[in-house]
Image (tube, grey):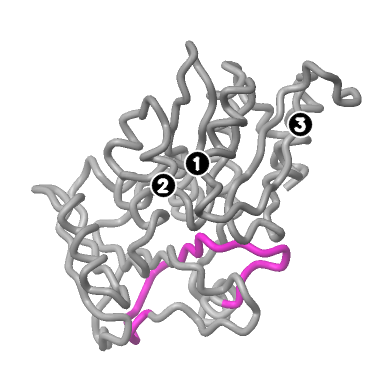
Amino acid sequence: MSAPTASTRVFALLGDPVSHSLSPVFQNAALRAAGLDGVYVALRCAPAEFAGVMRGLALAGGGGNVTVPHKQAAAAAVDRRTATVERTGACNAFWMEDGEVWGDNTDVAGARAAIRALLGGDAPESVLLVGAGGAARAVLCALEGAPRRVTLLNRSRERARELADRFQSEGLGIEILPLDADLAGREFGLAINSTALGLRPTDPLPPTGGARVAAALDLVYSPAETAWVHHMRARGIPAADGKEMLLHQGAAAFRRWWNTEAPLDAMRTAL
């Protein structure tokens, strides 16, 4: 990737906060590896200005990613939505195509890949899911297609109920419990933290209610991995943070923006 010119395509991560993000690191590495004329930056963006910034970037020939707290707003702001955006009601990738702003939810592909990497195959039948935000929507969408039992822990029962109503189906049963629910004596094949707990060093550990879990996936990531990942491994439980999900959702977005396969090895090395 050479120095930016007037024809360089600009891509950005839009959210608040964004200063911790590793997306610019591996997306710019991908651009260099592929020899493409583009640049990727992170832009802190307030709700009032978000839609204008997102559409402006796309209509100028660029695009980008969306992170908290704007994923649902992004789904409403795009002109065309992929099936995963329609299913989840959340959008994390945007670009211009045929004069319209498109939106996709590549978190679904990222969640599916992260679960497979941790477990060596498909997700187990019983899953403990902490949180009911945009990341949880991607997880539930990724879990669809086979019988699953999901126990959902969330502070707001109303928000959890909205999520369960969207995804509950014949094959995917969702039980809603408060964050402080007592799950002692229960077993889950996989526990997933889809909340922002762990983003700050002072955060408490995501709750598991004393349940026995066979593996743990934290969708939060940090350079030294999260405290929850270290806590789980200290108990002999296989665990991973959100870097694998980040990598694969980024690769899926790259394919949307450039209509070519992402240089995954270069992205993984940079990450």
Give the structural element (helix, strand or loop) at label 2. Answer: helix
Discs 1/3, front: 1
Q: Which residue is mark 1?
A: 51
Q: Is residue 7 above or below residue 222?
A: above
> Where are the magenta residues, as a range?
208-227
The amino acid on which the numbered mark 1 sits, given as a three-letter code, is Ala
Q: Main secondary structure of the magenta part?
A: loop
Q: Which residue is mark 2?
A: 73
Pointers 2 and 3 in contact (C-beta within 8 Å): no
Q: Is residue 121 above or below residue 234?
A: above
User: Which is nearer the N-term, disc 2 or disc 3?
Assistant: 3
Pointers 1 and 2 in contact (C-beta within 8 Å): yes
Residue found at x 8% / y 48%: 170
Judge the density around disc 1: few (<14), some (14-19), many (≥20) Cα neighbours within 10 Å. Answer: some
What is the distance, in whole Å, between disc 1 and disc 2 at their CAs? 8 Å
The amino acid on which the numbered mark 3 sits, given as a three-letter code, is Val
What is the distance, in whole Å, between disc 2 and disc 3 at their CAs? 24 Å
Q: Position of residue 92 (x, y in %)?
A: 48, 42
User: Which is nearer the N-term, disc 1 or disc 2?
Assistant: 1
